[in-house]
Amino acid sequence: MRVASIIDISLVDVPGIPVTVLFMAGCNLDCPYCQNAEIIPTDSGENMAIAEIVQQMKGNLTNGYCITGGEPTIQKDLPEFLKALRSENAKHINLNTQGTVPKILERSLPYLDSIWFDIKTTPARYAEVTRVNKNPWPRIEQSIKLILSSDVSFWPRTTYVGGLSIPSDILSISQALLDFGFKGEYTVQNFVKSTGVREAEAALFTEPDIEEPRSVLDQIPDGIDIRWEWR
């Protein structure tokens, strides 16, 4: 498996749970506002054996694990890794994914407790925003349905990017979630010009004012509770 880094403890990646964070390297999308752009290339990071990764992660004084990236599900042995991590103890296991590899996600679900699911934009804009040739929405739709039919907690979220996102995106995504049968909290967070964003890309976008997406708040369908996470 290709690994970018391991953070011993984080208090912000999983609500209420101190976790050890594993950043897997490589992603099959190319979002221009990515906060971890240096690990988008599939040859970034280093190749590590599953047993070695588990050994590094299990010794930390945390109550769980967060597996993020990059995009973890492009790693074909992700399910085997999660199984090994689960066999070590009963700690909470969270996965961050954008849902473009439903086959790997489906095999991973038995070992997960929660999933942060990054919905990049509306279905019609996916290829444009993620800069891929073919719209990945059908695979994302399949992944959402798989999670909702499982016992894993589904935590949808969207990064609102000034100069790229528009308020109606939040409304459309909320409606799509409701159409899937989801009711609950949907997190909308703001884009931040961190050092992880490619400099040339960061110049194209702004850190948005929360009042911009909130302009559609009174139109959000019943059953969807927007959680604003402005940093």
Image (spheres, helix red, strand yellow):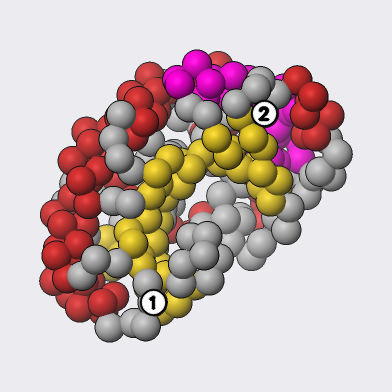
Amino acid tagged 2: Ile
Magenta span = 158-181
Mark 1 or mark 2, whichever is nearer to me: 1
Using the numbered discs, state the Cα–Cα distance from disc 1 to disc 2 in whole angstroms. 34 Å
- Image coordinates of residue 16 in percent, x first then y, are 52, 65
Name the residue at 86% across, 39% down: 211
Can the viewer see residue 128 in this picture? no
Q: Which mark is residue 12?
A: none
Vertical placement of residue 112 versus 214, above or below: below
- Image coordinates of residue 133 in percent, x first then y, are 43, 24
Give the residue pinned by disc 2: 170
Residue 169 magenta-drawn? yes
Check disc 2: other Cα within 10 Å, few if <14, some if 14-19, many if 20+: many
Give the residue pinned by disc 1: 62
Q: Secondary structure at mark 1?
A: loop
- Image coordinates of residue 226 in percent, x first then y, are 67, 37
Name the one closer to the observer, 12 or 54: 12
Can the viewer see residue 124 in this picture? yes
Name the residue at 55% across, 35% down: 184
Classify the position of the C terminus by image quarter: bottom right
- Mark 1 / mark 2, whichever is N-terminal: 1
